[in-house]
Image: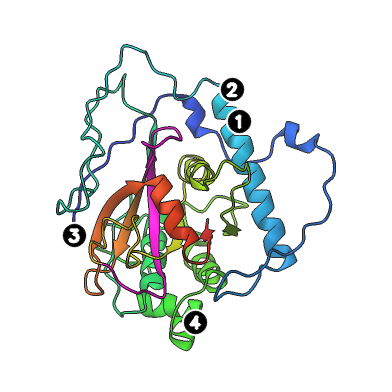
Amino acid sequence: MVSRRIVMVVLTAAVGLAVSAGPAAAAKPIQPAPTAAPAPAGERPLTVAEQALSDAKVAAAEAYLARLRGSGFGLVSLACVPNIAPPGATKSMPNAKVAQPPTLAASCAPPSGFLSVAARQQTKDHYCGPAVGQVVANYAWAMKAGANKFTQSVLAGWMKTDTRGQTSAPELVTGLHKGTFGSPRHKAGFKWAITNLEDTDGDGTTGDQLHGYLMSAISGAKMPIAIALKPHEPGAADFLASWPDPIRSSGHWIAAYGWSALWSASARTYYADSSENQGGGTGKYWDPTAEIARMIGRHTGRIVW
């Protein structure tokens, strides 16, 4: 496991804004009652209540990002010259994308946000969901290094992982709720939601939506995001740095705990993986957010946040 301390670059106090709907949101016209979204492959559709919760969370994220933009968040001097390892750290270079701390001077570093999490190795081949639950629960309860709030078996019971042979997004929500509710980092009113990642602005990518949700969840709500994806489909150009070898997978969960840069080809997603004995790796890694979004699209197209 790679254990490196990531220093979060704080460019403005606006990052501390809570993710909540403000007066401007209250002034919006009343929208029609939400309808359930169609089910992705292998999962049931969202209920009307689940869709409404997702819509509310997306709206809160959009409001949070609008406040950041209004504050001038992320603006840096044109004299700043990047000095980070180039994105040319290729897939063929072992550990090229193992998470590293930023090396730019604080005044020139790109905006970023990180949570203090520790990766966990999944204890069974189909326990990527419970492993993500363990990472998130340990963070939420501020557990000491090496300690676990709940065993993966307990989390698997809440998530019905053994019963189903895998962990669906709705069951992951149940496990995350039970694993984090009442913890010191579980804010009042926070609820775990499933969101179908969609290209809502029609620009041909869902990477910008994902990046916005990462910023809102990690720097606003101060909670990780659980991401379901195909880690390395045979023949795919995009795959996780933690999964260098192709594999026909039924799907995999990772815990996103960090982001860097404003939305662009340089935007990164930092995540904890749990799969060293399952064909992947266990530790902290990063990949371009645009690539993560495409990997999500090859699976259920869903995140839990």
Of mark 1 and mark 3, the one earlier in the sequence is 3
Front residue of this view, candidates 19 and 52: 52
Q: Quadrant of residue 148?
A: bottom left
223 vs 20, left or right, is left
Of mark 2 and mark 4, the one earlier in the sequence is 2
The image's colouring method is rainbow
Residue 202 in the image, given as x and y percentages of width and height: 62, 43
Q: Tag 1's secondary structure?
A: helix
Where, quadrant-wise, is the N terminus in this rendering?
Answer: bottom left
Label 1 to label 4: alpha-carbon separation: 38 Å
Rendered residue at 36%/13% (across/down): 78
Of mark 3 and mark 2, the one earlier in the sequence is 3
Please indicate, yes or no, whether residue 159 appears anywhere in the rendered image: yes
Residue that numbered label 2 is attached to: 70
Residue that numbered label 3 is attached to: 1
> Residue 160, labelled with which disc?
4
Q: Quadrant of residue 132?
A: bottom left
Residue that numbered label 1 is attached to: 66
Of mark 3 and mark 4, the one earlier in the sequence is 3
Label 2 to label 4: alpha-carbon separation: 43 Å
Residue type, numbered disc 1: Ala
Q: Quadrant of residue 20?
A: top right
5 vs 154, left or right, is left
